[in-house]
Image (tube, rainbow, N blue to C red):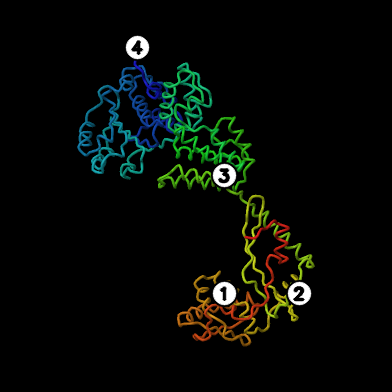
Amino acid sequence: MSEYIVTARKWRPMKFEDVVGQDHVTITLRNAIATKRLAHAYLFAGPRGVGKTTTARLLAKAINCLHPVESNPDNTCDICKEITEGRSFDVLEIDGASNRGVDEIRNLRESVRYAPAKGSYKVYIIDEVHMLTKEAFNALLKTLEEPPVHILFIFATTEIHKLPATILSRCQRFDFHRIAIDEIIGNLKGIASEEGLSIDDEAFLLIAKKGDGSLRDAQSIFDQAVSLVGKTITQEAILEALNIVGQDVYFRVTDLIKTKDAKGGLALVEEIMAQGHDIKEFLNGLTEHLRNILVAKTTESTSLIESSDLYRQRYAEEAKSFALADLLRLQRLVSGTEAALRWSTQPRFKLEADMVQMITMHSAAEVGDMVQQIEELKKKLLKTPSRIQEPTATLPTHVVETTQPQAVTLQSGSSAIRSTLAFNRPTGSNGHSNGASDTLEKRNQPVTSLSKEEVRSRWLEFVAEVRRQRISLGSVMDSSDVINMEGSVLRIGCGNDFQASSIKRNKELLAEVFQKIFHSKVRLEVEVNLRHVAPSHSGERNNQSSPPVVDQDEHPVIKALMSELGAEPM
């Protein structure tokens, strides 16, 4: 009975053309061998399982082979066989993790003086070279820069950022790439064909994606699946063998979102937990699923989606059911859930809560459509002033201000834009409103002079605008009040020197805000006088005879918003 050899070793590349996904490296090395332009030190960097050590062995065989074929080893001569079997005295593989000290490097420096036993070069392959200590690197520098002519160093590392710059500058560097899914699938299909295995395309795709860019990892998963299932492997068998969340589960999630089925979402979480799936792995798959829909929606193509043709078609159909803004919000929510699980003591509860939130989330409103509807309503109101009814109460000559802003919610499908509308209606000399168009006309006319009472009637509006532009100044103005208004001079009273100083420093800003509110230029003067400072504007208004207030729910503009745009009171 022959000894079993794992796929990664049994099907290790025996010539440069067999190395998967690293043509930029293998072509350069073959040209260097053909033109005899070999460097004295090479550095192979890249993620795990992409062919760094394999390429190093191929290079060692190619430069020592007795009968090379187009810069490739023939793999039949004695030297090639010895290197392949790991018993060559001229090719030494050193583990950087277990030989990381300065003493081991001193021994290496002593051994490089001896000529190769059989081949033309003595090759030192140091794997995981970043594990060497600082002292070991320093001891290697001189030998690495000027080695004997028969010596070749090949370093391999997955963490190149840990290597000193002095080492990097003495090596010819090659960066190995992650291997594409299509290339991994092609390699596995070739192996399956040679082994006489029957595997469907969906199973190949699952294995390749699980390999995450590493051919060695994918081949190990391949061996695991064959050991569990046998010579006939299906997608369902791979899902069971590797305990992977199936693609159909993620389509179920988006179906639940479309139907707003929160109960079904909790049932799905229960199913995932009962089958023993890892929550983090599920969220990773859901993130990729939403990304695929986003790509299909944005590009109107599925060429960038790593999946089978069947699922690509489903993604194209799924993209039609979601708005771009919704997909971005869902992705942010899933990413936030994944990050929060690191600190959560109850990850299942967190997943359930976020699943329900994701399913019941309202669709994002298209802001452009909403603005267009508001603009159309505005034009309609201005063209038909007769729709705005006169208030039945007799209003004073100054501006009537509602006690609180009227808040309404503008509904657009299942989306909501909340907007707070405050109405201040100037009145005529007879105490009655002259209509919306008359109000806009008066607002645009400059006011030549204002009385103290007129300024005080809109003082809260003035302070609110100041606070919107500068919060700290608005807080100071809260405790101030109008002492007098004479011509273009506004005298403001405040409670202490600090408040007076703050107002004086911001006179220009206050004047600009005053002109914006009252349409009149003004010069500010400040006095520190407690007698003139009201404890609160709301309290002062309560002591005065309150002017009649228009019923806000019956206000014609609010009624128009409710009827035209479906607004609802908050």
Q: In this rendering, which labeled residue sits more in front, label 2 or label 4?
A: 2
Q: Which residue corresponds to mark 4?
A: 1
Q: Where residue 463 is drawn, which disc sits there? A: 1
Horizontal side of residue 542 vs 379, given as left or right: left
Kind of residue indicated by mark 2: Asn
Give the mark nearer the N terminus: 2 vs 4: 4
Give the mark nearer the N terminus: 3 vs 4: 4
Q: Quadrant of the C terminus?
A: bottom right
Total marks shown come to: 4
Where residue 512 sits: x, y (%)? Answer: 59, 76
| Spatial separation of the CA atoms under disc 3 and disc 2 | 49 Å
Q: Is residue 40 visible?
A: no
Between 476 and 559, the one lying in front of the other is 559
Q: Which residue corresponds to mark 2?
A: 434
Categorize mark 1 by other alpha carbons within 10 Å: few (<14), some (14-19), many (20+): many
Q: Which residue corresponds to mark 3?
A: 359
| Residues at circles 3 and 4 in contact by the CB criterion of under 8 Å | no
Where residue 496 sits: x, y (%)? Answer: 46, 82
| Spatial separation of the CA atoms under disc 1 and disc 3 | 42 Å
Q: In this rendering, which labeled residue sits more in front, label 4 or label 1?
A: 1
